[in-house]
Image: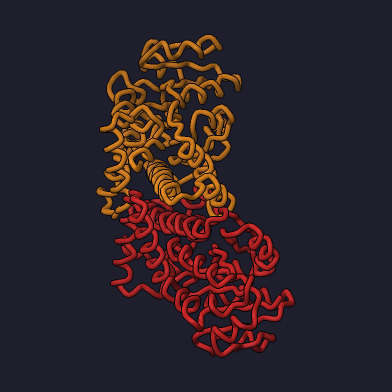
Chain colours: A red, B orange
Amino acid sequence: MKTGFIGLGNLGTPIAENLLNAGHQLFVFNRTSAKAEPLVKKGALQCKSVKELASECDIIFSIVSDDAALKEITEGPGGIAACLKKEGIHVAMSTILPATAKELSALHKKHHNHYIACPVMGRPEAAREKKLNFLVSGEKKFIDIIKPYLIQAGGAGIWEFGEEPAAANTAKLCSNFMIISAIESMAEGIQLAKKSGIDAYAWMNMLTHTLFSAPAFINYGKIILEEKYIPASFKLKLGFKDVNLVLSQASEVKAKMPVGEVLHKQLAKSMENGKGEYDWAAVADLLK
Amino acid sequence: MKTGFIGLGNLGTPIAENLLNAGHQLFVFNRTSAKAEPLVKKGALQCKSVKELASECDIIFSIVSDDAALKEITEGPGGIAACLKKEGIHVAMSTILPATAKELSALHKKHHNHYIACPVMGRPEAAREKKLNFLVSGEKKFIDIIKPYLIQAGGAGIWEFGEEPAAANTAKLCSNFMIISAIESMAEGIQLAKKSGIDAYAWMNMLTHTLFSAPAFINYGKIILEEKYIPASFKLKLGFKDVNLVLSQASEVKAKMPVGEVLHKQLAKSMENGKGEYDWAAVADLLK
């Protein structure tokens, strides 16, 4: 099966590289074509358009920045849905609204090919270490087809959320909400510890060896304690986009999110302060 | 050395029982004397007053409900500080304000005996399983004396925060803030998942096997998913007290806690709704 990859950003590049290293002939496309060069040097075949790539491939992985970008490459006469062959599979890894996934899934169905929602959890270094987690939803038989690819792409965990195409995107939004919530709480705790004159490192060390002995706290705790927000593994502006999606989904289904609203305010203020390109843990700076 | 224990509540009882099982002669006192009976049956010696107990013992452990209760048993002519022998040690396990610890430590010094701050992390079942974590601060040589007792009392971890007596209490407040923050975030995430029509159990299962693979999320996630808030392992009214202490400390040192303020509001509303005796995870009910 011929494989395509669209979206060679911070996270897309190492995922595509994993597929290439696994021996797949990989067709690639990126809006900024220069970003494809490192992969082309390793044997990837660069396409000039989405249409060209989609016409070549049986399975296409895409990871673009937001709902609008995903719609742009999927819809229209030159889009993935129209150009992908019958029974082809589009594996969409972007973090988007559940409603968008639903819409694009229906569009693919109209063109007799298939859409699988497959948002990814993990930073670029996790992709390189093959420690990603893929959240998937869509028709079971097509999930089973793409699973081996997901493992080759760097997946340590593949978590299925059923046949409803939007489900994995909902799970991803809920998860990103948990991460930014953990970041803000740690930041507030660390500030309180520091301003009260205790050793914040000792406190975080205790916490991450007891009740909070999990990667979210170990990894982000270190970043916040060291105030090392550049280079960003996950940019604050993307986190802000995701929290907007979270609140939009919450409003859609009438879910109350009082902490979610605070996180939105803090990220919005950080954006105003010019922190968009910093790691999203830089939200901690507002507490100083 | 003769050992005393004051405060036989939900958590105090299994801790005192551990000390008794370790072979210590244990003098006990509780305001509601009936609560001492199970321990007396196992060999504990019941005292009629704090004064009687303090005059007998070399080391006294106390775990009472709040700052006022700890002051009541420690201050005054019949209190621990005045009645404990010279060089005796008072190990105070309550969750209280750092300022109170400072004050009581000074009072003990005046009476030529010693105060060690030793707030505890863990629910009653953790005490029975000897999986508690003790946060300690105070003079190093007295910490070294009480350490073997803390292990016998059920301590799996003993975390030292230096000689400043208030430090362990600050660390405890910061930790309790993290727990209630984790509870509220999970509750909001679970509601969003449910109302969006996805399997919230599957989502929490993924989360607690990946980025949030820690006891705080595993244990409270289960309680929230099952909505099983009674019997309470940690009562909401005590959590509300603790969050009040957190905000009081934050105001004292001018630390900003936007999420802390939301948690305070949510717990206050839950108290108004009569949930004081429920587990503090019942704060999740507000989102329904």
The quadrant of the rendering that contains the C terminus of chain B is top left
Q: Is residue A259 left or right of residue A179?
A: left
Indicate the position of residue A137 as horizontal and vertical percent values. Answer: 56, 58
Indicate the position of residue B238 as horizontal and vertical percent values. Answer: 35, 32
**Residue B59 in sight in this render:** yes
Indicate the position of residue A217 as horizontal and vertical percent values. Answer: 50, 55
The residue lying furthest to the right in this view is A23
B15, above or below B95, in the image = above
Q: Which residue is drawn at the image coordinates 49% and 42% (left, top)?
A: B221
Q: Is residue B272 left or right of residue B225?
A: left
Examine the image and state in which quarter residue A39 appears: bottom right
Q: Which residue is drawn at the image coordinates 35% and 49% (left, top)?
A: A255
Q: How many marks?
A: 0
Indicate the position of residue A167 as horizontal and vertical percent values. Answer: 50, 56
Q: Which residue is drawn at the image coordinates 60% and 75% (left, top)?
A: A60
The residue nearer to you, when weighing B177 against B264, is B264
The residue nearer to you, when weighing B167 against B76, is B167
B181, above or below B154, in the image = below
**Residue A196 in sight in this render:** no
